[in-house]
Image (cartoon, rainbow, N blue to C red):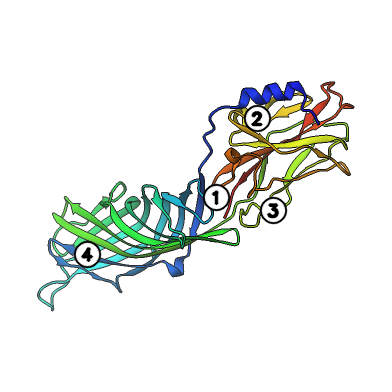
């Protein structure tokens, strides 16, 4: 099948240096497997936990998986929303005279943490080491001294020094898992009471992310088969499964191609093109071989482990946009061809 000059010209205008999107995965923290303890030394002495100094973590963590082969070759922590469970951590500074009340009760309420890291390398077995910076994004420190007034200090914006962590990030069955052990140290100063403290959190984060599904975007116009063509992923977005089968239907039983790239056109709205809309472009575009539709369906195995172009190799974490182009000489628009809508797929392990 010869590609019409109109499509070829349009494709050439889209060839440019492509900045493929890096893939960000949101992990859900496994609370029961994310156990922590805290210790604190203050200007009035060591603090003890009431009833103890243990807690768990719950929330989400965003990890960016950069381009690389499967298994994962590099990643970075982008952000997190992780809260302590229970929401209140309670400690006391004992009185040196045992029969007297404690020198102070200290409460940390509703503390939520985030953290970031530079991009780090991941070994073939999934192991990694890096430094993270932990930031308190919300929470209050309340000090109730034996003598004097109660003070409440917002903790938002408190930042730890970079601290080393070691752990694993692995993939299996189209899902991701990470775990690591960490120690974060914070220094708190309470101007009201004059109390200063070094607060140390030691524990483990264990989290999982599901492989996101494919999502449609853009729109198109009806073709001569009776409706607009909708593109879908009949297989899995898992690279290891190697069954990225694209389908577009309904389409006329004529020749067509699937093409893909790293960017959407016009913010995902597309632009008029032929009898439909061009949804994929604004960068380099890769085309599969021509296919003849049957039963008003175009089908194509994209071959993620053997792509049409080495530049179009699909790696874990990269996001790609797909569309079908097909001949439609009986179409109402008069151009002789039409397109499906667009499909966005994030590549999973």
Which label sits on residue 291? none
Mark toward the start of the polypeptide (3 vs 1): 3
Mark toward the start of the polypeptide (3 vs 4): 4
Mark toward the start of the polypeptide (1 vs 2): 2
Residue 251 visible in the displayed image: yes
| Callout 1: SS | loop
Relative depth, front residue between 109 and 119? 119
The percent position of residue 227, horizontal first and vertical second, equals 84, 35
Which-is-in-front pick, marks 3 and 4?
3
| Callout 2: SS | loop
| Callout 4: SS | strand
Kindly identify the residue that appears in the image at 42 percent across and 49 percent down. 76
The residue indicated by pointer 2 is: 269
Relative depth, front residue between 260 and 291? 291
Spatial CA span between label 2 and label 3 = 28 Å
Q: Do the residues labelled 2 and 4 touch (CB within 8 Å)?
A: no
Q: In this view, does 114 lie above or below 127?
A: above
Spatial CA span between label 4 and label 1 = 41 Å
The residue indicated by pointer 1 is: 316
Which label sits on residue 40? 4
Mark toward the start of the polypeptide (2 vs 4): 4
Q: Do the residues labelled 4 and 1 touch (CB within 8 Å)?
A: no
Relative depth, front residue between 293 and 187? 293
Dot 3, crowdedness within 10 Å: few (<14), some or many (≥20)? some
Looking at the image, the residue that sits furthest to the left is 97
Which-is-in-front pick, marks 2 and 3?
3
Spatial CA span between label 3 and label 1 = 14 Å
Which label sits on residue 243? 3
On-image quarter of the C terminus:
bottom right
């Amino acid at each position: 099948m010869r590609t019409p000059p109109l499509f070829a010209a349009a494709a050439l205008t889209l060839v440019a240096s492509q900045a493929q999107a890096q893939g960000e995965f949101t992990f859900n923290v496994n609370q029961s497997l994310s156990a922590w303890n805290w210790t604190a030394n203050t200007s009035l002495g060591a603090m003890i936990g009431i009833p103890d100094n243990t807690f768990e973590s719950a929330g989400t963590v965003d990890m960016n998986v950069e381009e690389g082969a499967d298994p994962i070759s590099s990643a970075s922590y982008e952000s997190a929303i992780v809260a302590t469970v229970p929401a209140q951590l309670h400690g006391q500074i004992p009185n040196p005279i045992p029969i007297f009340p404690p020198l102070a009760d200290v409460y940390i309420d509703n503390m939520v943490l985030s953290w970031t890291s530079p991009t780090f390398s991941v070994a073939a077995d999934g192991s990694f080491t890096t430094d993270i910076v932990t930031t308190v994004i919300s929470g209050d420190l309340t000090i109730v001294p034996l003598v004097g007034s109660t003070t409440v200090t917002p903790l938002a914006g408190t930042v730890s020094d970079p601290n080393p962590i070691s752990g694993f990030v692995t993939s299996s069955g189209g899902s991701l898992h990470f775990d690591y052990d960490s120690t974060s140290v914070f220094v708190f100063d309470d101007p009201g009471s004059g109390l200063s403290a070094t607060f140390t959190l030691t524990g483990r984060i264990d989290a999982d992310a599901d492989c996101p599904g494919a999502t449609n975007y853009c729109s198109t116009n009806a073709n001569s088969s009776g409706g607009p063509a909708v593109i879908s992923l009949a297989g899995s977005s898992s690279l290891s499964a190697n069954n990225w089968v694209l389908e577009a239907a309904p389409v006329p039983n004529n020749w067509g191609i699937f093409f893909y790239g790293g960017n959407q056109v016009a913010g995902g709205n597309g632009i008029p093109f032929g009898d439909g809309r061009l949804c994929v472009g604004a960068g380099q575009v890769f085309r599969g071989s021509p296919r003849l539709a049957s039963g008003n369906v175009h089908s194509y195995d994209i071959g993620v482990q053997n792509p049409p172009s080495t530049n179009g190799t699909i790696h874990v974490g990269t996001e790609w946009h797909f569309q079908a182009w097909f001949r439609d000489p009986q179409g109402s628009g008069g151009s002789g061809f039409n397109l499906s809508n667009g499909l966005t797929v994030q590549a999973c392990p």
